[in-house]
Image (tube, grey):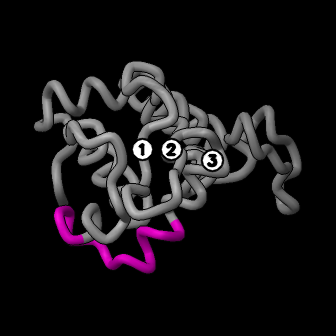
Amino acid sequence: MKAKYALKALIHMAQTEAATLPSKQIAEAENIPQKFLDNILQELRQNGIVDSKRGIFGGYYLARDPKDIFLGDIIRIIDGPLAPIRCASLTAYQKCDDCVDETACHLRRLMLDVRNAMSAILDGRCLADLVAAPDLLRTA
């Protein structure tokens, strides 16, 4: 849910012509609990995806062009590695305690395929793609 909310907020920001958007406005427009959204926006700000401006006309804005914000990066920032199990992760690899020979592990090979397929899709699409073709992000 957290990554979905992050993507919805970023799409809203990319579609809005305002220089900055208060989190309350984004939360109301996208039906996201504001405190939850505030935490998400803080994580995105710490990772250079959005920035913020204080003051009466303050709020959040995209820190990068939507063509330079890849969905895989957002998912990793918000939810962590794409791999379903740690031994299949490229960014947070950890050997399984119960695995005798990871090179022969059928489950690991399957999960590497899953991770690679997810990465191919998410790292190949950017925020601009979702703004141009909103049906790419289907709501569950």
Q: Earlier in the sequence, mark 3 or mark 2?
A: 2
Locate residue 95 relative to residue 52 in the image: left or right. Answer: right
Q: Quadrant of residue 88?
A: top right
Locate residue 124 relative to residue 74 in the image: left or right. Answer: left
77 part of magenta stretch: no
Q: Secondary structure at mark 3?
A: loop
**Circles 1, 2 touching at the beta carbon (< 8 Å):** yes
Task: Please state the horizontal and vertical placement of residue 49, each as a whole percent of the image.
Answer: 53, 40
Q: Which mark is residue 61?
A: 1
Q: Secondary structure at mark 2?
A: strand
Rendered-image quadrant of the C terminus: bottom left
Q: Residue at x 33, y 40 (%)?
A: 19
Q: Residue at x 51, y 52 (%)?
A: 53
Question: Which region of the structure is painted magenta?
Answer: 28-39
Rendered-image quadrant of the N terminus: bottom left
Task: Please state the horizontal and vertical placement of residue 128, each as a whole percent of the image.
Answer: 29, 25
Task: Please state the horizontal and vertical placement of residue 76, each as a whole percent of the image.
Answer: 58, 46
Q: Main secondary structure of the magenta part?
A: helix
Q: Which mark is residue 50?
A: 2
Q: Residue at x 40, y 63 (%)?
A: 56
What amino acid is labelled 1 in the image? Tyr
Residue 56, placed above or below residue 109: below
Q: Which mark is residue 81?
A: 3
